Amino acid sequence: MISIANQKSKIKNSIYLWLLIFHLFLPTCAISYTLSVGHLPPPRNGHTFLLVTDLSGLGPAVEINFYDDVGRRISTSRKLLPPNGKIQVDVENHLQVAGAIVLESSNEQIVGEYWQIQSGGGVDSLPYSMFMLPLQSDDSQEGRYFVNCFRFPPCRSNLLVLSDPYGSGPLVQMEFYNRMGELIRIARQLLRPHGTSAFEVSDYAPWDMLGKVSIRSLVGGSIALHYRQLCDNDVVLAVPARLPAKALLIDEFSTGRGITSELVIADSSAEGPAVEIQFLRDDGAELSKLEKLLPPNGTVLIDIADYIGDAASGMIKISSEAGIIADYREKNPQAVLDTPAVDCSPGNVLFISHFSPFDNTQDLLSLLNAAQEPAKVEIQVYSNDGTKLDSKKLVLAPYEQVDELMARYFDVGAGSQPARTGTVIVSGSNASLVVTSHIFDLKNNRHLGKAYAQIIR
């Protein structure tokens, strides 16, 4: 059995594939709620499926439509969700080519997750997941989304994947900025109704200049999008197109021991704000503090070792008076990591799925209080049929992290296997919480991936 006594050490010394999560919640003024994600088949033998979860307790009906890349509807699946429960839909049974997946319901309190399991070629199975991307929201700055493209040397394929969930055939504008914030190219593309298009970024801007990309729909309604890289050994990195925030957190960083680590911050406000960056140890003690002035629409790269030296680890807090996005890049002897900074605003309610994808795998639930004050936290756990399995309250000390095996909640009885899927809801009225799930391969003693919880309200 794998030891979980020192999970951060185990994670940093294991093969790592980023599990990136997108969520979808939609405005309450609409009658029908639409969730969407662009689908690309796995680069090698693999398996793709959806998890759809009800958070309303009402058990709403959902309709899932599958479209190919030119917008033809290939298949439709209609399901009734268990109240507070979860269903699984195998994508390969409905769509075998690139395209779009559109989920509709009359209830806004649903979550859609897109999982892709990659395996074959003598490589151990590795999962990667993302939540179905939000459509245009009131906070999206005229429907703008941002992708931070200032990163390590590019992978062999670097794609912006755009889909039309409403079938309106929108005109999409992509604005490419260099690192100093200068607009170097504008490209406009007309999406086919319900179609999906993947654009190679290097076709539009040179990598030695590119900083960020701003994407919005000019005419024709909302779009769904994400950024996907195909790297060496068919490793896939998926990065969300994000809305900006003023307070961000990277919950793990490392330097030394053959590790190259960098922090990339981009201005999404066009104001050129000053940014304060704090490097903290795991116990919250400050290692270093600095300020950077971002060029309007520009991007800065920070080599972390320049400020805290070798063989250090901890977390990074980033704050600004205007909207920013940030990413942490790490290249270690085992893997390349790409970690988007998360919004750490207090008072959030967070959703994360229990998922144990294979035999001999377990997932670990981690709760981090990223604040200087104690945090009162409540955890509620539901099975995939909606049964409430547990509810408990705890107090986390400043910067305390608590780790628990998910099987503790989902082990249904002696001699039986724990349930493979379930739901965990975490809330804290005064807390700046970071909630993650780590999946471990017990047979091969390896860390397979990490998923972040999503803010639901």
Image (cartoon, helix red, strand yellow):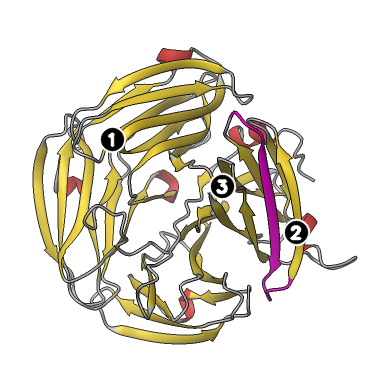
Residue 85 locus on image (x, y percent): 63, 74
Toward the viewer: 364 or 154?
364
Callout 1 amino acid = Ala
SS at circle 1: strand
Toward the viewer: 252 or 283?
283
The residue at which mark 1 appears reads as 266
In the rendered view, tell whether residue 238 sits above or below residue 167. above
Q: CA distance from mark 1 to mark 2?
A: 40 Å
Toward the viewer: 397 or 221?
397
Q: CA distance from mark 1 to mark 3?
A: 24 Å
133 to the left or right of 267: right
The residue at which mark 2 appears reads as 391
Residue in the image at 64% along x and 24% along y: 283
Magenta residues, start to end: 372-387
SS at circle 3: strand
Residue in the image at 16% along x and 53% along y: 174
In the rendered view, tell whether residue 381 sits above or below residue 452. below
307 to the left or right of 418: left
Residue in the image at 40% along x and 44% along y: 232
The residue at which mark 3 appears reads as 450
* Name of the residue lying farthest toward the right: 414
In the rendered view, tell whether residue 37 sits above or below residue 66. above
Q: Which mark is residue 389?
A: none
Callout 3 amino acid = Lys
Single out the mark in the foreground, 1 or 3: 1
SS at circle 2: strand
